Amino acid sequence: MTKPTVHDIAAHAGVSLATVDRVLNRRPGVRSETRIRVEEAIAALGYVRDVFAANLAKGRIYRFVFLLPGNDNSFMRALRGEVEAAALRASGDRMRIETVELPPFDAAAQAVALYGLLTEKPDGVALVAVDAPEVRTALDALVEAGLPVVTLVSDLPGSRRDHFAGIDNHAAGRTAASLLGRFLGHTPAKVAIMAGSLLVRDHRERAEGFQSVMQTDFPHLALLPVLEGRDEPQQVEALLGALLAEHPDLAGIYSLGAGNRGLIRALRAEKRPVVIAHELTATTRDALRAGQIDAVLNQDAGHEVRSAIRVLKALADGSSVVDAQERIRIDIFLKDNLP
Amino acid sequence: MTKPTVHDIAAHAGVSLATVDRVLNRRPGVRSETRIRVEEAIAALGYVRDVFAANLAKGRIYRFVFLLPGNDNSFMRALRGEVEAAALRASGDRMRIETVELPPFDAAAQAVALYGLLTEKPDGVALVAVDAPEVRTALDALVEAGLPVVTLVSDLPGSRRDHFAGIDNHAAGRTAASLLGRFLGHTPAKVAIMAGSLLVRDHRERAEGFQSVMQTDFPHLALLPVLEGRDEPQQVEALLGALLAEHPDLAGIYSLGAGNRGLIRALRAEKRPVVIAHELTATTRDALRAGQIDAVLNQDAGHEVRSAIRVLKALADGSSVVDAQERIRIDIFLKDNLP
DNA sequence: CTGAAAGCGCTTACAG
DNA sequence: CTGAAAGCGCTTACAG
């Protein structure tokens, strides 16, 4: 009735604790006959090991490394803050979490950092992946070496990473299109897309998702060419200012990157277009309240970080995860459901 | 550099482990002089106790009881399923989770069950609260006796429960109004509200939130009197059928309770009103895909259950929770971001 | 009021 | 190839 322990298995199989342990941990040096006897006992008693007690005995402390870009925008700052906060809590759970800050969008730097971890051998690695072949190669080398690797926020499809902790950016773009289309109604009108850079995978995916739903569901809305504001408020403001001068009748804007401070500044009070933006920051939150932005799609940095850690831990000690718990949602915020 | 343990404290304070333990656990029988010496050592070394090692030594198994209504609708079935699933995983974390199924909407039965727990003394209780004075009194008696109590899905304001694991239903109603108002545009039109029962707190709050935003933001939309379908498909279908016969020009429906199968049946293909419903079930998901429902507001039963358990555990061993992690979001699903 | 010793479930040298 | 003993960080009788 009470949970069986290693002692029960040892007794049942007629061996010592050490032998049970060897079988449990698939270590060599056990006659196959003995091994089988122990395995039968494990099965017969329905033994399931107490991972924590094991870690306590091992004196094991999980060491996880987060490779984070040093971008100076609200979202990345928040992400780094969440990793920081998790690191503080982590010590209680026998985990040590280290952060390495890398120059943003720098594939070479990220690849070098990954290769460095190959010798450092932490218990797991999380990274905001830069979408480049050398990163893919370096990442695969880590996985090959048996290191658990999780991509965070930005995925690296085609690589062998174990898990992606982030949102489905195609779905985000489609959702933005659906909302914008519904908000705009049936009159023909013009819609603009402001991206950070289409060289970045998540931005590209959002744009694609948005365009595909616009074409199929809202053919009466005309899409202007995608603008790239580099996630910089200044550039966003300049580009949008020019666009509004050219198309004073612009009816909708999908801002799928950062730099929304510039967007707000470019909008004039009269004849405001419907705006859908990404990431709940101080700027977008205020704009939502003030009615300058109509909806914000958000990924919760805290969820993403905690999920990445849970998954790394599970990978490190071979336990399983609750899939539903690790699915990162696209939050939709209107002024009415702000947290 | 390494984390200090009880041994370090004992050495630093010049006492035995037993004494350190007594101070750590605020047990009596320590001279105040000694106690102070130990406390100083704890502070000086920055000791923080390893909760798991402590539980291992204590042989402690947390016992949590979930009081759940036996309602036969998709959401409550899913909720019970999630508790079940969590119970299976729980044994690995030294927790035992028991479920007690109660007749739905039965305040007396719930109060009796709560008083029963007063003598059973589990380590924590979670309940889908029935909004009635006798439940409040019983719940407060448990809290008074030192039992951690968490309300789940349906809160009991004015009670002394430690935590509520559920969504803000006012905000949900406001959000529904905002979406529906935006989807309907500027032409004057009629809108209906279908509730389960206004005697249930969450339904009442959703209706209130919806009405308030409708009045202030969309005065051109006329609200018809609230219908109460008792969360029964049959009743919902009948009521809605009659309503549509009377108001063939009905433009929008906010279905804030259950029984949406009936709603789908009542809708005719031609001249479909815009519909916003609650809870992502097989029915609402299909209807969303088919374009019969335009948006679904959802509370994630899995999140709610896992959150309730985390909070109960934290309350039971006096540790702290990550507030942001325990805030239950209102998910908004369009056909484009279905999980 | 205080401490020495055994034990929770597991692992790890070390001997044999 | 196998086992006895000590130990991870904490708690709990039991003695004194």
Image: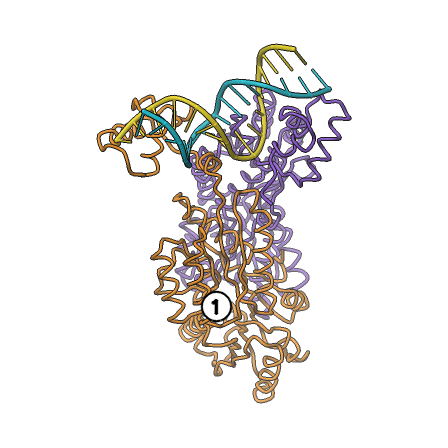
Chain colours: A purple, B orange, C yellow, D cyan
Q: Is residue B301 above or below residue A71?
A: below
* Residue B169 on image: x %, y %: 45, 66
Chain under disc 1:
B
Residue at x 37% of width, y 71% of height: B133
* Residue B59 on image: x %, y %: 49, 39
Count every numbered label the image shows and give the total: 1
Judging by the rendered image, the residue that carries numbered circle 1 is B178
Give the camera-side residue of A196 and B331: B331
Report which quarter residue A336 is drawn in. bottom left
Q: Amino acid at mark 1?
A: Ser
Give the camera-side residue of C11 and B187: C11
Q: Is residue D16 left or right of residue A141?
A: left
Give the camera-side residue of A158 and B281: B281
* Residue A281 on image: x %, y %: 43, 49
Q: Is residue A289 above or below residue A87?
A: below
Residue at x 52% of width, y 75% of height: B196
Quarter placement of the N terminus of chain A: top right
